[in-house]
Image (tube, rainbow, N blue to C red):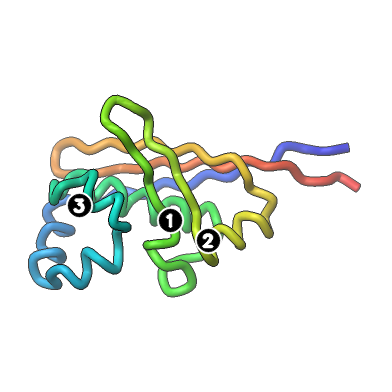
Amino acid sequence: MTSLLLRTGVDMVDISRLSHMIEMSGEAFVESAWTDAERLYCAGRPERLASRWAAKEAAMKVLGQGLGTISPLEVEVKAAEGESPTLVLHGHAARQAKRLNLDVWSVSLTHEGGWALAFVVAAGSMSDA
């Protein structure tokens, strides 16, 4: 018999604080935290960068691991205007998801009032044997 495995993670980011971190750290921080595709889509808009940072943190919570174990570049938010975002895992993050039997991912992003929030849900199956 197989049971559904469901894990969730949520994270919230102060947009002005993240903007300040970007200003202080420069391009090196941006390149180490967001993929080329994410940076292109966000076009420097701090609220978009912040919501993706929140998604990365939320996904790490789902995986039971944090920064240092998983690189922010290993959790990527794919998006196109007018479409729902999707989450793609790379490297260690993908291996951890496979180890946990998590193979279906959903992400929701929002930003308002100076805050960005992401909610991540992962599902898979676990054997009851």
Residue, disc 2: 93
* Residue 54, position as x, y percentages in the image: 33, 51
* Residue 97, position as x, y percentages in the image: 60, 55
Q: Secondary structure at mark 3?
A: strand
Near-viewer residue (43 or 64)? 43
Q: Give the mark count.
A: 3
Earlier along the polypeptide chain: callout 2 or callout 1?
A: 1
What's the CA distance linking mark 2 and mark 1? 7 Å
Q: Secondary structure at mark 1?
A: strand
What's the CA distance linking mark 3 and mark 2? 25 Å
The N terminus: image quadrant? top right
Q: Amino acid at mark 3?
A: Asp
Near-viewer residue (48 or 16)? 48
In the rendered image, which quarter is residue 122 located in?
Answer: top right
Q: Secondary structure at mark 2?
A: helix
Residue at the top extreme?
Answer: 82
The numbered dot on residue 29 is none
Residue, disc 1: 75
Q: Residue at x 37, y 30 (%)?
A: 84
* Residue 86, position as x, y percentages in the image: 43, 39
Q: Residue at x 60, y 61 (%)?
A: 96
Q: Residue at x 15, y 47 (%)?
A: 43
* Residue 6, position as x, y percentages in the image: 63, 41
Looking at the image, residue 51 sits to the left or right of residue 11; the answer is left
Near-viewer residue (107 or 36)? 36
Q: Residue at x 37, y 46 (%)?
A: 77
Q: Which is more foreground, mark 3 or mark 1?
A: 1
How many C-alpha atoms fall within 10 Å of the one at disc 3: few (<14), some, or many (≥20)? some
